[in-house]
Image (cartoon, rainbow, N blue to C red):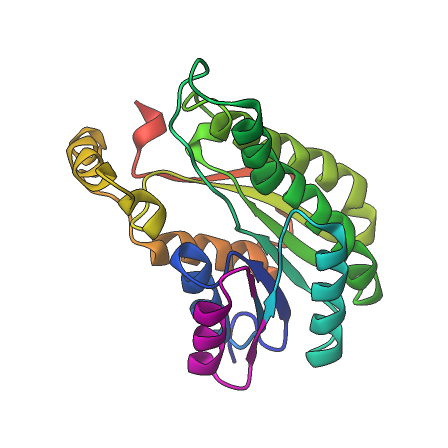
Amino acid sequence: MGRLQDKVALITGGARGMGASHARLFVNEGAKVVIADILVEEGQALALELGENATFVKLDVTKAENWQEAVAVTEHTFGFVNVLVNNAGISMSKSIEEISEQEYRKIIDINQVSVFLGMKTVIPSMKKGNGGSIVNISSINGLVGGAIGYTDSKFAVRGMSKAAALGLAHYDIRVNSVHPGVIETPMIAQGDAKEQIQEFAKSIPNRRIAKPEEVSNLVLFLASDESSYSTGSEFVVDGGLTAQ
């Protein structure tokens, strides 16, 4: 029996990168998974690959009505939501002098407001299912400084996770944040970022960037009943980067 046997999980940004890695591992561990993303073709292809225990729903994480639809699809297809992984996010490396208000608000909407909307929307479903686990993907930039906008939003995810954990504990709904370091995903392969990342990897104590699966293993633990006494906490997976 899998570690998530018969649990129902909704994963945002699930079409590729870390989200797709989470989805694959969850299905392998017995979960029924709803892959939520704006990338329709990639999401549908992944759902087809994973078989009858996966389906795709188009979700713009910044829109409350889209969240309502996604949860409704999840309940209709598989049942009450047991696990929510707020994985969707974007990054931008502009300085505070360069970034526009519009760009800043876009980052906050996708990385921060979406997490609030997701948590708020799944609460009734999790209550009906007698509890659940919410895993919010933050970043090491939710612990230490980095790019403006991105850092702000990831610190917010960390704080929201703690606040929600306190507010939802009596429903047996757990909320934790995961703080990945440098992970091998499409997000870090944009433009000339690949060479910069490879050079940066030399400063990581483990001397390499991580595979998405290494984050997925931690997310799996938090989604499962194995972490039943963990809530309101940060879980770091960064090869020792923030320990320096």
Which is nearer the eye, 1 or 206? 206
- Residue 73 in sight in this render: yes
Q: Position of residue 83 (x, y in %)?
A: 64, 61
Q: Position of residue 49 (x, y in %)?
A: 42, 81
Give the magenta-colored segment's residue range. 36-56
Q: Residue at x 43, y 63 (%)?
A: 20
Q: Position of residue 223 (x, y in %)?
A: 57, 59
Task: State the image quarter where residue 107 is shown.
Answer: top right
From the viewer's perspective, is residue 45 above or below residue 148? Answer: below
Left or right of residue 29, residue 224 in this image: right
Q: Position of residue 105 (x, y in %)?
A: 60, 30
Left or right of residue 178, residue 18 in this image: left
Left or right of residue 224, residue 66 in this image: right
- Residue 131 in sight in this render: no
* Position of the C terminus by quadrant: top left
Q: Residue at x 32, y 40 (%)?
A: 182
